[in-house]
Image: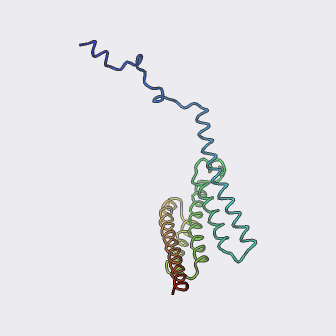
Amino acid sequence: MSSYITNTTPNPYTNPIPSRAFAIATPDALYHSEVQKDIVNYLIITFFLLSCIFHLMVFIYRPQKIAHLYFSILTFSILIGFVFNNAKLSLFLLSDIPLTAGLRCVLVASATKIITILFYVKSQFKLYYSSLPYHIILYITGIVLIITLLAPVNILLYCFPAFHILSLICIIWAIYVTLRTYIHKQSDFFYYNYI
């Protein structure tokens, strides 16, 4: 009976546990994984920076296309928010900025995103945008932005959810205006071509 128990009990010397369960990452593996993360972060930064510069140059050469200016500001504010939200990048690039200034920069970038989305949609879809939600979102964003600039640090943390909710409402409104414009253009096309 005892021989049966000893034969069925796993013995680490005869049946070793796979080494992957206890694998410890070597310094080279850790370094390569960090380099891969850094490359992805820098590619994202490069993409937003090039997009910002491209749309700004289009606006400089064609000032009547104001939507390109709004899109350039939008991509730059997304870039600022990405840099400040990434702890490693903010420590590397912005190590001399105090924490409260960093929080305020992230919140101002969030407000800038909302405001530029509103202006962009208004400039692109002048005929079909609804002005009441536009003005309500714009005024509430302005109020929260003033609170962000003047409030003490303990109030700043309450501004994050406010900007997230405003961003969600702004994106839903932008999608609604875009769909409304598309539906009206399709119905006009159908009316003039088939009736």
> In what quadrant of the picture does the N terminus appear?
top left
Vertical arrangement, residue 90 with respect to residue 29, above or below = below
Percent coordinates x, y for residue 119 in the rendering: 60, 74
Residue at the right extreme, as displayed: 61
Percent coordinates x, y for residue 74 in the rendering: 62, 66
Residue at the spot x=47%, y=62% of the render? Answer: 161
Horizontally, residue 152 falls left or right of residue 90, namely: left
Q: Quadrant of residue 81?
A: bottom right
Residue at the spot x=63%, y=68% of the render? Answer: 71
Vertical arrangement, residue 100 with respect to residue 59, above or below = above
Residue at the spot x=60%, y=41% of the render? Answer: 34
Percent coordinates x, y for residue 26 in the rendering: 57, 30
Percent coordinates x, y for residue 178 in the rendering: 53, 74
Vertical arrangement, residue 189 with respect to residue 40, above or below = below
Q: Nearer the viewer, residue 21 or 147?
A: 21
Residue at the left extreme, as displayed: 1
